[in-house]
Amino acid sequence: MAPLKFAPEVAAALKAGAPVVALESTIITHGMPWPQNVETARAVEAAVRAEGAVPATMAVMGGHIHVGLTEAELETLGQAKNVAKLSRADLAACVASGGTGATTVAATMICARLAGVHVFATGGIGGVHRGAETSFDISADLPELAQTAVTVVAAGAKAILDLPKTLEYLETAGVPVIAYGQDDFPAFWSRSSGLKAPLRMDSAGAIAAAHRMRATLGLPGGQLVANPIPSEAEIARAEIMPVIETALAEAAARGIAAKAVTPFLLQRIFELTEGRSLASNIALVLNNARLGARIAAALVKG
Ligand code: PSU
Ligand code: MN
């Protein structure tokens, strides 16, 4: 038996067949600064509840995978320094050794599958990094989407990544990439990446039906739902691109590699935009939480 520790609210919801939405914790520890990280995590949980679903934030603590965190646990995680960033490769070792770790998209998908949660909402996913043809830096989030049957709602991927290569990878791996309510694949702070998404759906019910049909057909893996940031919170591509280029140049100059790349870039972009990127980030995560809850509700209706 996997060492899962369910929050009472999550256990009750799963038992009753009520909608549950998984949430990740790396966005708290490595994606946003304190105290906005904890405030956002709370607001995201509230947004899921407001849509009639139960939030299950995942994290590893004391030899357990926590499925749903208490207020105090959320606060501790949000203030802690040097929390491990756990992807697929790191998860088992951290649980086995009793360490503390925050789950990435890949690890959160694994935890959600173990807990019986089918829908997960976050901000942005990892992807194929620019220069991957020499660095080989491809996020473990992508192969996870190909093998773990969880529908992930994100605002697309940041342009710190190579977005055409990320879409090519997902196509090769057989992952449905579904733009919500528009034709274009969104680019996190911007509603469009300038690239067309392979699929478009306009309702939570359609996304839930596609999720169920993958299971019926025996197809492993999940779906990526790319939900564009609300217009009023958008940062135009022309405005954010120079900031991204600066952050990327600094990462290269300082020899940042492997697991450190994504957190370094996120941190530098927050600093360089003086909070503007953070306000947008919060708005898009909340928007994804609401859509995730509606998909989870549509799934349990059957
Ligand atoms: N992209 C974002 N915000 C994030 C992350 C990515 O816009 O917080 C985090 C997520 O937890 C994601 C992880 O799963 O970074 C990807 O890291 P890597 O590229 O090292 O796989
Ligand atoms: Mn990487």
Image (cartoon, rainbow, N blue to C red):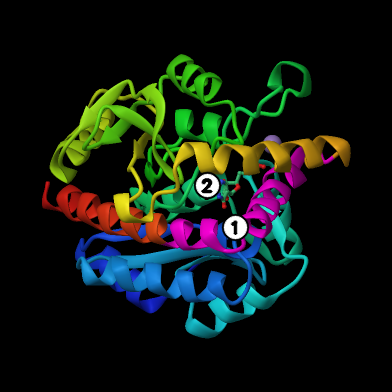
Reading the image, the residue beneath label 2 is 105
Residue 281, position as x, y percentages in the image = 47, 56
Within 10 angstroms of label 2, few (less than 14), some, or many (20 or more) residues? many
Residue 83, horizontal then vertical, whole percent: 72, 65
Count of numbered circles in the view: 2
- Is residue 25 visible in the rendered image? The answer is yes
Please tell me which residue is depicted at 42% across the width and 41% down the height of the picture: 190
Q: State yes or no: residue 265 in magenta.
A: yes
CA–CA distance in space, label 2 to label 1: 8 Å
Q: Is residue 13 above or below residue 250?
A: below
* Quarter of the figure with residue 9: bottom left
Q: Is residue 258 left or right of residue 65?
A: right
Answer above or below: position of 195 versus 83.
above
Please give the name of the residue rendered at 62% of the width and 62% of the height, measured from the top-left corner: 274
Q: Is mark 2 on a helix, strand or loop?
A: helix
Q: Give the range drawn in magenta.
A: 256-282
The extreme front residue here reads 238
Residue 228 image position (x, y, % from top left): 33, 43
Q: Does the magenta stretch include residue 184?
A: no
- Mark 2 touching mark 1, by CB under 8 A? yes
The residue lying at 33 percent from left, 48 percent from top is 118
* Relative image position of residue 249 (x, y in whole percent): 77, 36
Mark number for residue 26? 1
- Is residue 221 positioned above or below 14 on the image? above
Q: Is label 2 within 8 A of ligand 1 (CB to nearest ligand atom)?
A: yes
- As drawn, 143 above or below 16: above
Closer to the chain start, of discs 2 and 1, is 1
The answer to whether mark 1 is within 8 Å of ligand 1 is yes
The crowding category of the residue bearing disc 1, from other C-alpha atoms within 10 Å (few below 14, some 14 to 19, many at least 20), is many
Along the horizontal axis of the image, is 269 left or right of 258?
Answer: left
